[in-house]
Image (cartoon, coloured by chain):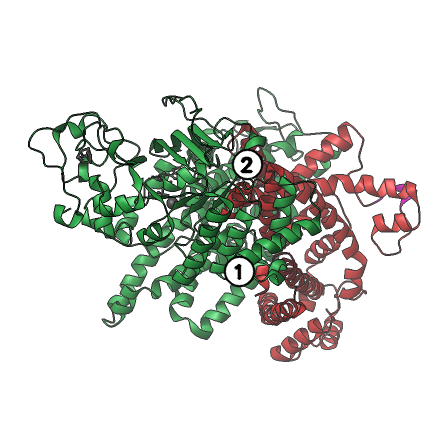
Chain colours: A green, B red
């Protein structure tokens, strides 16, 4: 039996500590799209309207649902008309039984709320109790309950409800309790699953295991955490169940197994209208149905909206296709005419995203050249915009992202070229390798399909056999047996998948390869294999490589030049040797001092964190963390300036960065250890 | 692909289905025997003399201890004997054979409508996220889900049958044009007998119920396909496919859309239960002489034996369908087999 379910997707992770959870409780709402919030509010408004109708309506409206005559004076009755169409007097008309339809709608609403409230309570109490018990006790009991719940869940809810009401009818006369029991039973499994899953996951938490040794506290801890997690999930299930329950109740009524006729109930009323329809009478069927549609829609809107908010995957992170406005347009430099042919030429490149906390420039004016056969390393802390840069080289933007500036590859300006030109370039003129090899291949396609599809897109005249031959060549180059060409991605290890990706990157011999941390997820042996393949391409095929990496060891081994990025800008650029032995920018010094690995934890040697890109510092972006910060550093941004042969840095410590170095400031010496950063 | 892994996978699924069947049948047995008294008295009490009632009870084995009845029930269900109704001379199996084709025909036609609607609108909605088309699609999905199928059915009858008079609203075929029944699947029957008048007649009767049912289930598909599409569209391999310079329609269809459909197969299995529930209502609305209608009638007659038999059959079909879906998923998605 399959275990996918509607509620699985709303099951939240139970591992975050309580306090953090509370702090972030409101955040999803803030970050949710306006549409989600609109859904929730309009739905909630409708529900309130129906609640008013159900609670206040019976008091205000003069007639009752089962009333067919009115006492005008004591003892004198006027019977209501039969099948009167809607009029000023009887807004919704009357039924064949001379009932006032509006009165029946109102009473029907009262009944619906009563039944749903009882039904959902039954389901919740039973489901939560069983879930706690099953998850907490585990073992055989758990397995039996789970399978039973799966069985109930798999069974058609309506048929189940019919059977239950059928059996119950032998004990009690049809009414709210029996209808509620029939409707409620159906939803037990959903609460059960959520609670059981949370209980299980919380039970395995180390702190609960620890608490276990203290005996009694164990249950309190468990209860509290399960409760908190479930409370997050239950509103969604609850509203969606209530919506369902109203439909099931109406269906029972329509089939004649609901409450005792002629109690006003929307489904029953529709069943009474069946013959009217054949006679062309519309109002008896229309109104009760409309009431159902509106109330169920309202509940669904709230449920869906809440789910959108709670489920982060669906939360909008920037809106598709919309341009970021109110951002400065870039300066455009004229192309150098003299220079040698470049593999890639990047000028004033900017990458912007629209995020929940505001628009930001993840890459903010980056310029550099990549020569054929050259390997440039791009280093910097996580979040400084390296991947954004890499993607921008191919204009590969997620929804809500924009690229500005200039990226020239093989005579095409990637930023302004037409969609089809850029597409042509991707994979053929420039390849992009990603960090995570595990998820980059389509799980449903064989490796050969990936190759054939790509080769035939770029070289339409190639036959399938030729394409496969090319693919086999490329696989051999990266050290994968060509016999494995027809395997599926999941049949390869991570290292092999990355080599498959590399083979795809080189199969059309591009002039540029952008490799975004291609070896981070892999072990050192695979890493050096991949680096040596890149090295060979660089030397033999004159491919220009932009290697994004965390690993300074890789930089030293494989690259000619290094560009150091900080908060969206290049702060220093120069030959590998110079950067390692004679770093100029205080940030570079910090990086080199922390040696080998550049991940954030190591960078604590500098202290602090990169600034927010939504509202970056006005002057030098490194100023808040810089040990050499000067007064004017916070006033205007430094420009890249020559600090050595072929070496440039953006720091006011060096003349030419925009401001003279003030007297008394000692330019740090070459050795980062000595300079004490 | 290695046959072995698929075979092992199927065997595994089959093994998992066995406890499921067992528990489902046990629950049904307990549920139906929770009612007081015995089925014969409940059904025929007051209408037959007491001696005859006792005789019937004896004949049906209702005087046996409950566990004997239980094992007889399970044994029967497993060997394809669903018992005999109290109020109908036919066996439950015969009733199923007589009425199930109508239900299957309706369900298949409804599923077709649902899949076509749900997959296209859902996929386009996901692609055009937050555009008017998307919002319209989502709203339609929610509204149609919120509308009881018998109500939309009645409104459709009112408009197309009563007001316009273009489509029939009752039964599976009308007048003298009903096809000669061979398999019980009228569409199929009229095609193999080459009776085009009957085919037109049968199809025109099928339109309203199938579309009514299909719209409802389609509404759910729209929502699910859309969410899946949103997820695959932002998946790593879709980005990687773009990075290889594939054409946008290839990226969308071969990479995003196809994987977005895998969960749909699973969901189709889950929706099957819902489809049955709604088939009950649709059959009643359109007086469609199917299995669900038969069940409703037996419930009306309080015929426990028939209800138990039919519901047992439905339970087995549900387990079977979910097994089938699992196997289908295994065929489509190579990862599942491991
Ligand atoms: N799709 C996106 N939408 C919004 N913001 C993004 C997106 N991708 C990246 N960012 C933001 O841009 C900044 C740079 O990210 P990234 O380019 O991935 O940096 P790096 O690769 O150096 O870690 C980060 O602050 C990140 O939050
Ligand atoms: S410009 Fe000022 S703050 Fe920025 S790195 Fe140089 S010295 Fe530090
Ligand atoms: Mg990155």
User: Mark 1 sits on what residue?
Assistant: A479
Res A24 → quadrant: top left
Where is residue B35? Give x, y as percent. Answer: 59, 66
User: Mark 2 sits on what residue?
Assistant: A425
Where is residue B287? Give x, y as percent. Answer: 76, 46
Number of on-image labels = 2
- The quadrant where ligand 3 appears is top left
Please tell me whether residue A249 is drawn above or below residue A617 in the rendered image.
below
Q: Residues within 10 Å of mark 1 (few under 14, many from 20)?
A: some
Where is residue A501? Give x, y as percent. Answer: 52, 51
The question of residue A208 being in magenta is answered with no
- Secondary structure state at the residue bearing disc 2: helix
Sequence-wise first label, 2 or 1: 2
Of B218 and A549, which appears nearest the observer?
A549
Res B171 → quadrant: top right
Indicate the chain on which mark 2 is placed: A
Write the start and end of the magenta stretch as one range.
Answer: B173-178
């Amino acid at each position: 039996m399959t275990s996918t379910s509607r509620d699985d997707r709303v099951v939240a992770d139970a591992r975050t500590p309580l306090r953090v959870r509370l702090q972030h409780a409101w955040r999803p709402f803030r970050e949710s799209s306006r549409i989600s919030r609109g859904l929730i509010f309009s739905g909630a408004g409708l529900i309130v309207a129906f609640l008013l109708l159900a609670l206040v309506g019976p008091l205000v409206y003069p007639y009752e649902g089962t009333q067919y005559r009115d006492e005008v004076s004591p003892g004198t009755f006027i019977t209501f008309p039969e099948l009167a169409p809607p009029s000023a007097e009887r807004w919704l008309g009357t039924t064949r039984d001379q009932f006032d339809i509006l009165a029946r709608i109102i009473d029907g609403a009262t009944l619906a709320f009563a039944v749903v409230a009882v039904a959902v309570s039954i389901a919740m109490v039973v489901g939560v109790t069983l879930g706690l018990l099953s998850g907490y006790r585990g073992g055989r009991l758990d397995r039996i309950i789970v399978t039973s719940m799966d069985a109930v869940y798999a069974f058609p809810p309506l048929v189940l409800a019919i059977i239950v009401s059928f059996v119950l009818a032998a004990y009690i006369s049809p009414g709210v309790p029996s209808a509620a029991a029939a409707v409620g039973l159906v939803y037990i499994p959903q609460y059960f699953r959520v609670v059981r899953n949370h209980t299980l996951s919380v039970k395995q938490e180390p702190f609960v295991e620890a608490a276990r040794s203290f005996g009694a506290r164990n249950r309190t801890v468990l209860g509290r955490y399960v409760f908190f997690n479930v409370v997050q999930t239950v509103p969604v299930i609850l509203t969606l169940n209530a919506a369902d329950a109203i439909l099931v109740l109406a269906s029972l009524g329509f089939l004649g197994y609901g409450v005792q006729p002629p109690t006003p109930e929307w489904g029953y009323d529709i069943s009474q209208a069946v013959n009217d329809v054949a006679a062309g009478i519309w109002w008896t069927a229309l109104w009760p149905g409309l009431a159902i549609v509106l109330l169920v829609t309202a509940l669904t809107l709230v449920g869906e909206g809440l789910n959108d908010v709670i489920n982060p995957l669906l939360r909008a992170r920037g809106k598709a296709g919309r341009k970021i406005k109110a951002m400065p347009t870039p300066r455009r430099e004229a192309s150098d005419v003299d220079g040698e042919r470049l593999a890639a030429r990047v000028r004033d490149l900017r990458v912007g995203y629209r995020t929940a906390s505001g628009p930001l420039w993840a890459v903010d004016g980056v310029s550099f050249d990549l020569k054929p056969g050259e390997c440039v390393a791009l280093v910097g802390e996580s979040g400084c915009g390296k991947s954004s840069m890499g993607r921008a080289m191919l204009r590969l933007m997620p929804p809500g992202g924009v690229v500005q500036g200039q990226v020239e590859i093989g005579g095409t300006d990637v930023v302004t070229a037409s969609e089809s030109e850029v597409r042509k370039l991707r994979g053929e003129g420039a390849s992009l390798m990603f960090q995570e090899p595990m998820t980059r291949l389509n799980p449903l396609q064989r490796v050969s399909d990936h190759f054939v599809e790509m080769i035939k897109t770029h070289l339409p005249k190639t036959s399938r056999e030729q394409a496969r031959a090319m693919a086999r060549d490329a696989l051999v180059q990266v050290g994968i047996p060509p016999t494995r060409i027809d395997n599926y991605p999941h049949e390869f290890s991570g290292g092999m998948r990355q080599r498959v990706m590399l083979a795809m990157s080189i199969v059309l011999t591009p002039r540029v390869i952008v490799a975004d941390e291609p070896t981070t997820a892999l072990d050192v042996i695979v890493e050096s294999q991949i680096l040596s393949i890149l090295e060979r391409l660089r030397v033999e095929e004159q491919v220009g490589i932009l290697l994004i990496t965390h690993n300074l060891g890789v930089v030293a081994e494989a690259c000619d030049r290094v560009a150091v990025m900080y908060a969206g800008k290049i702060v220093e650029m120069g030959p590998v040797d110079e950067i390692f032995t004679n770093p100029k920018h205080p940030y570079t010094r910090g990086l080199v001092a922390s040696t080998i690995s550049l991940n954030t934890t190591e960078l604590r040697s500098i202290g602090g964190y990169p600034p927010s890109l939504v509202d970056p510092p006005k002057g030098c972006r490194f100023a808040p963390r810089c040990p050499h910060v000067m007064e004017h550093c916070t006033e205007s941004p430094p420009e890249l300036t020559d600090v050595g042969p072929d070496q440039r840095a953006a720091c006011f410590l060096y003349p030419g960065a925009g401001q003279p170095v003030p007297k008394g400031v000692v330019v740090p010496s070459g050795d980062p250890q000595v300079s004490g950063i | 692909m290695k046959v072995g892994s698929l075979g092992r996978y199927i065997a595994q699924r089959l093994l998992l289905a066995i406890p499921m069947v067992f528990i489902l049948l046990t629950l049904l047995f307990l549920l139906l025997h929770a009612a007081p008294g015995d089925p014969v008295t409940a059904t025929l009490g007051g209408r037959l003399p007491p001696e005859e009632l006792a005789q019937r009870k004896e004949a049906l084995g209702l005087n046996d201890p409950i566990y004997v009845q239980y094992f007889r029930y399970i044994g029967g269900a497993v060997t394809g004997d669903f018992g005999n109704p109290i109020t109908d001379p036919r066996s439950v199996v015969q009733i199923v054979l007589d009425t199930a084709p109508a239900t299957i025909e309706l369900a298949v036609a409804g599923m077709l409508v649902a899949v076509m609607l749900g997959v296209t609108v859902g996929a386009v909605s996901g692609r055009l996220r937050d555009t008017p088309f998307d919002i319209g699609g989502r709203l339609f999905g929610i509204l149609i889900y919120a509308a009881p199928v018998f109500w939309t059915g009645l409104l459709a009858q009112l408009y197309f049958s009563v007001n316009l008079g273009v489509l029939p609203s009752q039964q599976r075929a009308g007048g003298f044009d009903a096809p000669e029944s061979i398999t019980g699947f009228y569409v199929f029957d009229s095609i193999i007998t080459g009776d085009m008048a009957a085919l037109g007649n049968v199809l025109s009767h099928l339109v309203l119920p199938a579309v009514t049912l299909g719209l409802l289930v389609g509404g759910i598909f729209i929502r699910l396909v859309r969410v899946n599409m949103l997820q695959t569209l932002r998946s790593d391999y879709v980005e990687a496919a773009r990075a290889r310079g594939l054409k946008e329609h290839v990226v969308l269809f071969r990479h995003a859309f196809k994987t977005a459909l895998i969960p749909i197969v699973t969901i189709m299995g889950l929706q099957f239960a819902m489809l049955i529930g709604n088939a009950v209502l649709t059959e009643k609305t359109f007086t469609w002489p199917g299995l669900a209608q038969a069940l409703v009638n037996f419930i009306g007659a309080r015929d426990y034996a028939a209800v138990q038999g039919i519901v047992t059959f439905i339970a087995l079909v549900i387990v079977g369908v979910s097994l089938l879906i699992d196997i289908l998923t295994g065929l489509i998605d190579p990862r599942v087999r491991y």
